[in-house]
Every structure is written in C-alpha cells, then in structure tokens.
Amino acid sequence: MIRSRGSSSDERLRRIEAITDATLSQLRSQDLLDVLLDRVCDLMDVDTAVVLLLDAHAQQLVATAAKGLEVEVEQGFRLAVGRGFAGRVARDRTPVVIPDLSVADIANPLLREKGLSSLLGVPMLAAGELVGVLHVGSLAPREFSEGDIQLLQLVAERATLAAQVRTSEIDRMAALALQRSLLPSRLPGVPGLELAARYLPGHDTGVGGDWYDVFHLPSGWLGVVIGDVSGHGLPSAVVMGRLRSALRAYSLECDDPADALARLDRKIHHFEAGSLATVLYGMISPDREQVVISLAGHPPPVLAPLDREAQMVRVPTDLPLGTGRPERRRSTTVDLPAGAVLVCYTDGLVERRGEYIDLGLERLRLAVEPGPAEVVCATVISAVAAELPTDDVALLAIRRP
C-alpha cells in the first residue's frame, strides 16, 4: 500500500518551526547537519536522510552527513554530478521524486541494500550556485507531496548555510595548518646574532598571508624576510607559501635583495595575477656588521642601537609586488652596530581601524629598546599588540650581541 502524508495548516507550521528553530544556530555546523537530518526524518516520516556536498574540483558529490545511511559517510561515498539519482538532482538543480526505486536508475548500491522503495531529493543552492544535494528515502512505497518537497527545500536552505560554515571552518583549519608548516618551527642558530619571532593570527579575519623567514646563503650571508600577502584565509596562505619558496630560490641566484624582489614581482604578476604582497628582504653580511635591505611596499624596520633611541630605518620603499608596474627596485646598506636590535614586522602590528598608521609606528618605535631578542619580541607584543589584532601579525627581532 502506498502511503501519502498530508499537511494541515497547523501541522505545516509545526514542521517549519522545527526546521527554523533559533536554537539550531547555536550548534556547530556538523552537529547542525546531524540535527536537521534527525528532525526531517521525524517530520516527514522517512527512514533515511543524506547530505552530499559538492567537490567543485572533482565535480563529485561527497556524502557528508546521514541518518539511516551512515555507512555512506563512513565509506566516503562519492558520486559524479549527473550520474544516478543524486547526480541528476545536482545536474538539473531541481527536485527529483522516485516513487518506485526498483525501476529507477540508481548509481549507489547502498540505497537498494537498505531496502528503500521511494526517494525525494532537492538541490542545495547558494546564490544560484550548487552546494550539494539533500535526499530522503522511505522503506515503504511513498508518494511525496508538494508539501513534502517544499519542506525538504526549506531544510536544504538551512543545511546549505551549515555546509557553508563547515567549509569555511575547514578552509580556516587548512590555512592555519599550511601557515604553521611554512613558518619556521625553530629559527636557525646563527653565530654572531640572536633571533626571535612571533606570529599572531588576526582576531577578526583569521589566518592570512603573513610570514617570516631566515635562511643561510652559500656565500655566508644570512637572508631575512618578512612579508604580507593581501587578503585572508586559505587562498592567501597558499600564495604566501608559493612566494616564500620562490624567494628562497631567487636568493640563491641574486646577490642583491632588490634583484630578488624584482624577480619575485614578475613571478607574482605572471603566475599569481590579482595578488599583491609587501615584502622586506634583507641580507646580513658574514661579519654581521651590515644588512642590505630592499622594501617592496613594506613598512621600514626599527633599529635600536645602544647609544641612542630607536628609529625607523631610512630605506626607500618601492612598489608592492604584483602591481604590474615595472620599476627599478633599490637596496640600501644599513649598519648593524654591536648591541643593536633590528625589528621587522607586518602592518598588522601597527595598523588600527580609524587611526593614522603614523601613531602605530610611533608606538612601536617607543617600545623597541636594545636587549635580548626574545625580550624585545615579548615587550613589543605586550606594548603594541595589547589589544587583539584585527589583522595577522608577524614580528622578527634580530640582535647583534
């Protein structure tokens, strides 16, 4: 016997309230998906409910959450868009009802193994773009009504929001893992120098493209880098990783920091179109008495000698990398006296919303005093970044003891 489920006005209102319950917004994204599937099974009197999210690169649907078909998620089931029942929902971006599974084109054998008789699937869309597919199934033959379709579409809207939050969380975790893998876990030991560094993720925007790097060169010079790729999240972290590797490669071929940055600029313009980055690249001499610095749109470092107060190093600032405007880049040689400390940083340390950057630069200058590199880093972070930063912060202190 085929069963049909109708909806009175009161019943329809109850079902909608169960899906739009404000308390659901307090759940984590994965928990929200699980709760939504539990509720839709109860409200629609179905035996299975599954969310498959789109892997845009593979053009496949991936089982992400399930009720009654948990094995799909456990096995990491994937289905090409356009193939089978869910693939057709994704391809056509319209609800699909299968009243009799025994005569339907089904690509997932688990649906038949479960003993399902009827299926209803709807697309999950955001701003017209496909996010995934939500489908429910019944063990008993079932005629899904127009009201059932409308309710499942409402659930799909809520599930889409949860899926987008989940994707954002995954991207942020991936970006954080990538960034941490690229930042030195331990700065190299350098005879004649003390080194210390800090990295603070932005409070509002999360992981971005800030990085610092220190590496020995075959000539005996020491390369020091601090940079900031525009934007935030996984895309910026990926670009940052590429620039870091490219600059290391160019440093082996260039004896002049300006030459290395000019090559990096061409690389960004050609292969990372649309990206911008500011970079400080310095080379410290083998005797540790001088540092040759080139700035690509980056704020100048702070130098604090023993015999006078700290000052911003007078180094000409060239255009950021990636502007597409070729120009001659410049390097400047700066003395690094014994006992002095050189502090390099990204603009997240000195920029504040609604405030001129000059005020932040002055706060930083006043906070830098000669001393052990670790103490300098701790002091600067305490004095200048006491508030939670709204942008990522990278800080590198170099002291010649």
Image: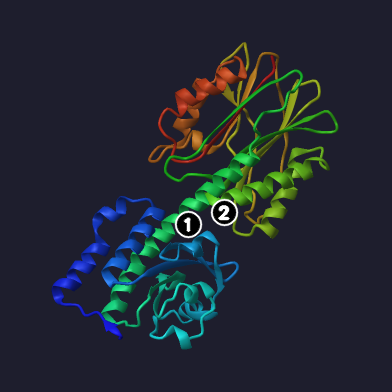
The N terminus - image quarter: bottom left
Q: In this rendered view, identify the residue nearer to me: 307 or 283.
A: 283
Q: Position of residue 26 (x, y in %)?
A: 31, 50
Q: Residues within 10 Å of mark 1 (few under 14, many from 20)?
A: some
Count of numbered tags = 2
Residue labelled with disc 2:
235
Which image quarter: residue 353? top left
Q: Position of residue 149 (x, y in %)?
A: 32, 78
Under circle 2, the secondary element is helix
Tell me what residue is drawn at x 50 percent, y 30 percent.
361
Tell me what residue is drawn at x 45 percent, y 23 percent.
383
Instruction: In the rendered view, tell whether residue 112 sits above or below residue 172.
Output: below
Mark 1 or mark 2, whichever is nearer to me:
1
Residue labelled with disc 1:
167
Q: Which mark is residue 340?
A: none
**Residue pushed farthest top?**
307
Instruction: In the rendered view, tell whether residue 381 sits above or below residue 277.
Output: above
Q: Residues within 10 Å of mark 2 (few under 14, many from 20)?
A: some
Q: In this rendered view, identify the residue nearer to me: 209 or 142.
A: 142
Three-letter code, disc 2:
Pro
**Residue 89 in sight here:** yes
Instruction: In the rendered view, tell whether residue 4 sits above or below residue 290.
Output: below
Nearer the N terminus, badge 1 or badge 2?
A: 1
